[in-house]
């Protein structure tokens, strides 16, 4: 008999394990009743409690290294129609519980009481006396700590289990995890989008630009405006020369608008490039113009492929005023200017924005840089497209 299987057989002989397994099966059966009404939230709550119990049993029961495998085998035999009881997923439940349990430990009350009260309410009528005893046992007074934890639980049960696995694998800090959960709920991110945002460190970039929004916009608007700014912006979907011109950068961003918009964030609606503003008989053109559907305002983005210089603010300030006077209507909020530079000195930016009355934010960006000789050696996008069309025609002829 294999060594691993022998250890599992030894575990099943423990009366303590058999008693716990029996209770666990009953808990899962009870949870199945409510699953039809709230599949994801009930499943997340169940996984949390399974993770808690696994941690406690591993610390106290001393059943050996085959414990997870044996539990997986027993649960899958009892619930063959239910997915999620693989040894791998049970380990994820353990990680899930251990990752967020420090919040609970700080808040004193125990999550198991919250879960128990929900499960007890689903017990059959003949168990009403037992139910009342359990409710009395688990009764917790309402307090601020309980309210905070309920808010955390509401977030945890609002995203799919696969998202939780991804977060606990790639994020080491609870504050960051809650940030990504909030953003997932707010923006309805798929797992792929969530992974991209984590890998590009949205947590570290969002709200890190230098702005004057706090003094030029009212409180609710200024908070939202600060949230849409990142530093730096990740344009690594572009492969450009290290000496790229601003017009080329602008064109490339528009050509890759499907990548550019997600990097800007939810709410940006593209209005056009080189938007014309006629002031006193002269024409001026903004680099990029957007409308933000949540802020309810126009957003001008100016691109600079070199380090920040104070005069950049003056030009952008002029554009913001012009859009407010010539484009914005009475229902729109004040126009916002975003200046994206290759580099910046934060002190110089703050100094330049000090007496500017229009809302302006200054950030940086980076893209995949190629030396000029490498860039010249690569075929253009147009040439690649023509080659692909020629290949398809030749293939069709055959």
Image: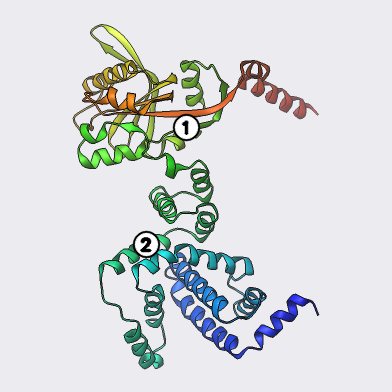
Q: How far across and down, in percent of the image, does residue 209 sit? A: 36, 33
Q: Residue at x 40, y 36 (%)?
A: 230
Q: Residue at x 42, y 61 (%)?
A: 156
Q: Residue at x 29, y 41 (%)?
A: 224
Neighbor class of circle 2 (other Cα within 10 Å; few <14, some 14-19, many 20+) is: some
Real-space Cα separation, disc 2 to disc 1, in angstroms: 32 Å
- Relative to 364, say whether 17 is above or below: below
Q: Which part of the image, by quadrant, shows the C terminus?
A: top right
Q: How far across and down, in percent of the image, does residue 295 sit? A: 29, 37
Q: Which one is in front in this view, the residue at disc 2 or the one at disc 1?
A: 2
- Of 245 and 389, nearer the camera is 245
Look at the numbered disc 2 and give the secondary structure of its residue.
helix
- Of 270 and 239, nearer the camera is 239
- Relative to 128, say whether 280 is above or below: above
The residue carrying mark 2 is: 152
Q: Is residue 268 left or right of residue 79?
A: left
Q: How far across and down, in percent of the image, does residue 88 sit? A: 62, 66
Q: Earlier in the sequence, mark 2 or mark 1?
A: 2
Q: Is residue 29 left or right of residue 379?
A: left
Neighbor class of circle 1 (other Cα within 10 Å; few <14, some 14-19, many 20+) is: some
The residue carrying mark 1 is: 260
- Image quadrant assignment for residue 317: top left
Q: Is residue 380 left or right of residue 243?
A: right
């Amino acid at each position: 008999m294999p060594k691993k299987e022998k250890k599992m057989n030894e575990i099943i002989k423990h009366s303590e394990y058999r008693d716990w397994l029996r209770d666990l099966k009953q808990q899962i059966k009870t949870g199945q009743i409510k699953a039809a009404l709230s599949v994801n939230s009930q499943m997340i709550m169940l996984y949390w409690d399974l993770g808690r119990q696994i941690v406690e049993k591993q610390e106290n029961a001393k059943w050996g290294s085959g414990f997870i495998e044996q539990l997986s085998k027993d649960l899958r035999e009892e619930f063959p129609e239910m997915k999620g009881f693989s040894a791998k997923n049970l380990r994820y439940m353990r990680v899930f519980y251990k990752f967020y349990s420090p919040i609970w430990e700080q808040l004193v009350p125990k999550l198991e009481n919250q879960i128990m009260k929900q499960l007890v309410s689903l017990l059959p009528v003949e168990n009403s006396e037992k139910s009342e005893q359990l409710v009395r046992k688990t009764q917790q007074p309402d307090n601020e700590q309980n309210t905070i934890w309920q808010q955390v639980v509401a977030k945890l049960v609002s995203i799919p289990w696969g998202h939780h696995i991804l977060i606990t694998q790639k994020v080491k800090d609870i504050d960051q995890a809650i940030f990504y959960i909030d953003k997932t709920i707010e923006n309805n991110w798929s797992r792929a989008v969530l992974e991209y945002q984590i890998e590009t460190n949205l947590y570290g970039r969002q709200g890190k630009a230098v702005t004057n929004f706090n003094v030029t916009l009212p409180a609710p608007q200024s908070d939202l405006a600060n949230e849409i700014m990142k530093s730096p912006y990740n344009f690594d979907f572009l492969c450009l020369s290290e000496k790229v011109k601003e017009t080329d950068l602008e064109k490339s961003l528009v050509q890759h608008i499907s990548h550019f918009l997600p990097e800007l964030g939810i709410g940006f609606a593209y209005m056009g490039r080189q938007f014309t503003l006629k002031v006193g008989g002269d024409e001026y053109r903004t680099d990029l113009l957007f409308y933000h559907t949540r802020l309810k305002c126009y957003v001008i983005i100016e691109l600079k492929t070199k380090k920040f210089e104070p005069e950049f603010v003056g030009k952008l300030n002029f554009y913001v005023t012009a859009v407010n006077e010539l484009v914005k209507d009475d229902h729109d909020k004040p126009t916002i200017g975003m200046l994206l530079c290759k580099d910046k000195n934060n002190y110089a930016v703050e100094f330049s924005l000090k007496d500017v009355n229009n809302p302006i934010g200054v950030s940086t960006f980076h893209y995949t840089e190629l030396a000029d000789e490498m860039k010249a050696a690569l075929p253009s996008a147009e040439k690649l497209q023509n080659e692909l069309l020629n290949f398809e025609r030749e293939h069709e002829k055959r």
